[in-house]
Image (cartoon, rainbow, N blue to C red):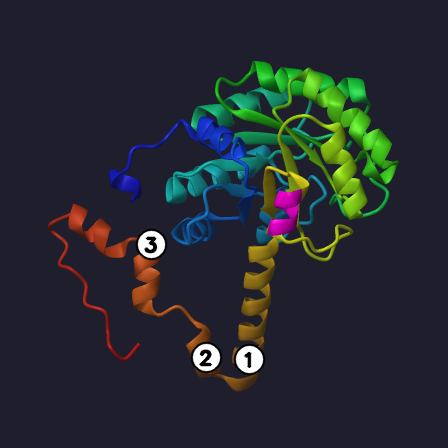
């Protein structure tokens, strides 16, 4: 629980040890503290904060319009709720070299496990959409090196969107980014199993795969990713999509029926929700609070 736990600043080494195992690690995509706590309670070992998911939670498009302050605020809440290894999607770095270094150092001080940056130019787009504009290899390598120099423990994940040019160009960039200091390579929008195999054969070191829905990457099971040799597999927007669809359907039903009863069986009970947020543990920290009794009719 937040008020009685010690913040673990060794998340980067924990993630590195997990990547050294033979099995692939499923990384739960989260977008706020509650989703992070829910993922933790289900036994996930690492979390991923997607720029697309966080933007959507703010009712904004994934076009680089979110600010670094909004990102930092979200990271602080997620770490508070989970105290887990967190990979943070920093998009194109929220500015130029000094801006990226400042953000990287801030996130490193907060104890994130890894910082991810990508090789698009602004305005950036979702990796599974068309007409993405790439920065030069040299510029991205400068960003990686600057990011690396500004952190202590935090790992650097370099994402390339060059697959839209060719898989060969994506691999070429991936290797260059490794040489610049990237600890993890993320080749976005892999279109086939053969592309996945080619990336694994060509790149030495940890690979991150994006198993997003409704994109260009074919549905691939964790077992298959493990066979392919990818260390990390993220599900960046899945939970948000499920939550958004559920809320939309609930509001539609409430508006048309004038009652929430139809959805009651799909809701967390009060007791379940209080368990997730450690309600009674907080009460125990302040002996002046009388322990709450859960209503039996709700």
- Decide which of 234, 249 is in the foreground and name it: 234
Rounded to the nearest angstrom, the CA distance separating label 2 from label 1 is: 7 Å
User: Which is closer to the viewer, label 3 or label 2?
Assistant: 3
Rounded to the nearest angstrom, the CA distance separating label 1 from label 3 is: 27 Å
Numbered marks: total = 3
Q: Position of residue 126 (x, y in %)?
A: 73, 45
- Decide which of 120, 222 is in the foreground and name it: 222
User: Is there CB contact under 8 Å for labels 2 and 1?
Assistant: yes
Q: Position of residue 114 (x, y in %)?
A: 54, 30
* Residue 229 position by quadrant: top right
**Residue found at x 79% / y 17%:** 138
Q: Which residue is mark 1?
A: 253
Q: For mark 1, give the secondary structure.
A: helix
**Residue found at x 30% / y 59%:** 275
Q: For mark 3, give the secondary structure.
A: loop
Decide if residue 223 is in sight here.
Answer: yes
Q: Which secondary structure dominates the residues rendered in magenta?
A: helix
Q: Which residue is mark 3?
A: 277
Residue ranking furthest to the bottom? 257
Q: Is residue 35 above or below residue 104?
A: below
User: Which is closer to the viewer, label 1 or label 3?
Assistant: 3
35 sits left or right of 50 in the view: left
């Amino acid at each position: 629980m937040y008020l009685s736990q010690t913040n673990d600043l060794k998340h980067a080494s924990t993630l590195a040890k997990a990547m050294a195992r033979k099995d692939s690690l499923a990384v739960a995509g989260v977008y706020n503290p509650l989703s992070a706590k829910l993922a933790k309670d289900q036994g996930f070992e690492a979390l991923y904060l997607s720029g697309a998911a966080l933007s959507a939670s703010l009712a904004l498009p994934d076009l680089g319009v979110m600010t670094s302050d909004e990102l930092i605020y979200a990271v602080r809440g997620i770490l508070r709720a989970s105290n887990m290894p967190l990979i943070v999607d920093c998009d194109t770095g929220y500015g130029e070299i000094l801006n990226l270094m400042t953000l990287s150092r801030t996130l490193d001080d907060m104890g994130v496990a890894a910082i991810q940056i990508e090789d698009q130019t602004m305005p950036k787009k979702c990796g599974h959409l068309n007409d993405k504009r790439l920065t030069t290899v040299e510029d991205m390598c400068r960003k990686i090196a600057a990011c690396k120099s500004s952190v202590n423990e935090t790992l650097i994940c370099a994402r390339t969107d060059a697959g839209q040019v060719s898989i060969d160009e994506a691999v070429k960039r991936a290797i260059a980014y490794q040489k610049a200091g990237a600890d993890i390579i993320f080749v976005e929008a892999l279109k086939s199993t053969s592309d996945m195999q080619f990336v694994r054969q060509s790149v030495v070191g940890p690979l991150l795969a994006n198993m997003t829905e409704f994109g260009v990457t074919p549905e691939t099971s964790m077992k298959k990713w493990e066979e392919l040799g990818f260390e990390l597999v993220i599900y960046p927007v899945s939970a948000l999509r499920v939550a958004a669809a559920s809320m939309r359907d609930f509001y539609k039903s409430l508006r048309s029926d004038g009652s929430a009863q139809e959805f009651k069986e799909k809701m967390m009970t009060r007791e379940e929700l209080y368990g997730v947020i450690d309600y009674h543990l907080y009460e125990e920290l302040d002996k002046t609070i009388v322990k709450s009794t859960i209503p039996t009719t709700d």
